[in-house]
Image (tube, rainbow, N blue to C red):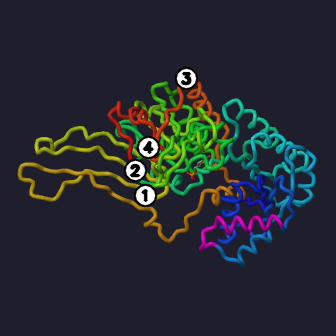
Amino acid sequence: MNRNSTLLLFGATGDLARRMLLPSLYALYADNLIEDDLRIFGTARSDLDDAAYRDMVRDALMEFLPEDRIAEQQIDGFLQRIYYQTLDASTIEGFSDLADKIGDISGGLSIFLSTAPFLFEPTILGLKSAGLAGDNVLIGLEKPLGNDLASSKIINDAVNQVFPEERTFRIDHYLGKETVQNLMALRFANMIFEPLWNAQAIEHIQITISETVGLEGRAGFYNDTGALRDMVQNHMLQLLALIAMEPPANLDAASIRDEKVKVLRSLRPVSENDIVVGQYGAGAVAETLVKSYADDLGDVSDTETYVAIKTFVDNWRWQGVPFYLRTGKRLSERRSEIVIQFREVPHNIFKDRGAKLESNTLIIRLQPEEYVRLLVMSKEPGLDRGQMVLREVPLDLSLTQAFAGARRRIAYERLLLDLIDGDQTLFVRRDEVEAQWKWIDDIRETITKNAMSPKIYNSGGWGPSTAIALTEREGVSWHE
Ligand code: BG6
């Protein structure tokens, strides 16, 4: 493994850096997971020196680290490796000062770019001009990387002129989540699931990412983006790809990404009847009154904060199996979950004794709780004179309990470490992103062509009632 000895964060004073990146780096440092000689440079427009930036970092750590993680001495040690250089990335001038400040990068440099999209290109050019884009430099790119296929190609082309694909790390933070990776363990480290993981045994699949939060002060970005592009284009499609892909040859980046992209390319275009878009109205979430999206935004808007979709993966394994996806803000609870609904048994031998059978359901809860639950039919105890009662009971695997002693790592800890180590497995390859955009662009076109405007739903519920109809007309209920 080739571990880089310098890390450079663009957008180093921003929200993502303060909330996620700096606390993640600190956690890696505190657990001795990064080398002693790793130097961390932050850069942004704010005019700060090392000392002022270190103060900012300290404040961010105090605010966002869990209490049991705060240890003064360790924080001091961590801050010693942090440096800062002011930079206006929109012009090329400042980049040589940045390079001077960083100095020797012969030990390899990993760059994490989380900046406004219009800064991508000048930043890449600036890095090149200052000699910060050589063979031992890796670049991590945080979304948004464009807002449709065409704009994502422009960004990718610009990046690609300087950083070849093997040195480009596109971030989808869902891939860094422990439970998302556990999907692969569940599927490919157990004999019992894979033989049934196909259209013969599975009736449909649901993927839900529901959130209770609303706009969260990101009005400009979110209103231009909407749920389809903010959540479905990336996180939900990556989950879908991991659920639907064929077994990869091994855990190499290429093997896994080759399998995922095949799924993404097999996604069937979605018809207008299979799309529901919604926008939150006022309501109550966890007993707190909340305003409507329009009030949060201070304007009327056609942006969707909720989307539900029925689609198919048109390949051999999944022929005829609907995949229902839904995500939304200001819903009843925060939940990321995959539900695998198996088919009925071919013949109910209990029928004459009055027993009704339910089909098996596998529920994979990714967050906030982490569990795998298999609903199985079981006989209710009793002497069964006349009638026999069968009931669905859960076979529960609580990952939180089973691995109670293990530290839960947030996605960015793993992703930053992989970026430092140069491991691309959990990053999204260009062909995947483009297949994702192609499918999303087509949906957006359908929405526009059919003048579908978002249905208002009450905050604190499960989205517009039309989303219920989307599944109910097929005799399916959303898992709630
Ligand atoms: C981000 C979206 O990518 O993911 C946000 O931009 C969303 O709108 C977030 O809230 C959800 O991430 P998580 O890890 O909280 O499920």
Which residue is found at the position 55% from the left and 39% from the top?
305
Mark nearer the N terminus (3 vs 2): 2
Give the x, y percent position of residue 321: 40, 34
Give the x, y percent position of residue 438: 61, 30
Which residue is tagged 2? 363
Do residues under tags 1 and 2 come within 8 Å of each other at their CB atoms? Answer: yes
Nearer to us: label 3 or label 2: 3
Q: Quadrant of residue 304?
A: top right
Which residue is tagged 4? 462
Which residue is tagged 3? 451
Q: How far is the residue under mark 4 from the one under mark 2?
A: 18 Å
Q: Is residue 65 magenta?
A: yes
Do residues under tags 3 and 4 come within 8 Å of each other at their CB atoms? Answer: no
Nearer to us: label 4 or label 2: 4
Mark nearer the N terminus (1 vs 2): 2
Q: How far is the residue under mark 1 from the one under mark 3?
A: 40 Å
Front-lying residue, 117 or 437: 117
Which residue is tagged 1? 371
Q: Quadrant of residue 352?
A: top left
Say what amino acid the circle numbered 4 marks. Trp
Q: Residues within 10 Å of mark 3 (few under 14, many from 20)?
A: few
Secondary structure of residue under mark 1: strand
Give the magenta range.
Answer: 52-69
Say what amino acid the circle numbered 2 marks. Ile
Q: Is residue 210 magenta?
A: no
Say what amino acid the circle numbered 3 marks. Ala
Compared across the picture, whether 467 is left or right of 426 comes to left
Do residues under tags 4 and 2 come within 8 Å of each other at their CB atoms? Answer: no
Say what amino acid the circle numbered 1 marks. Tyr
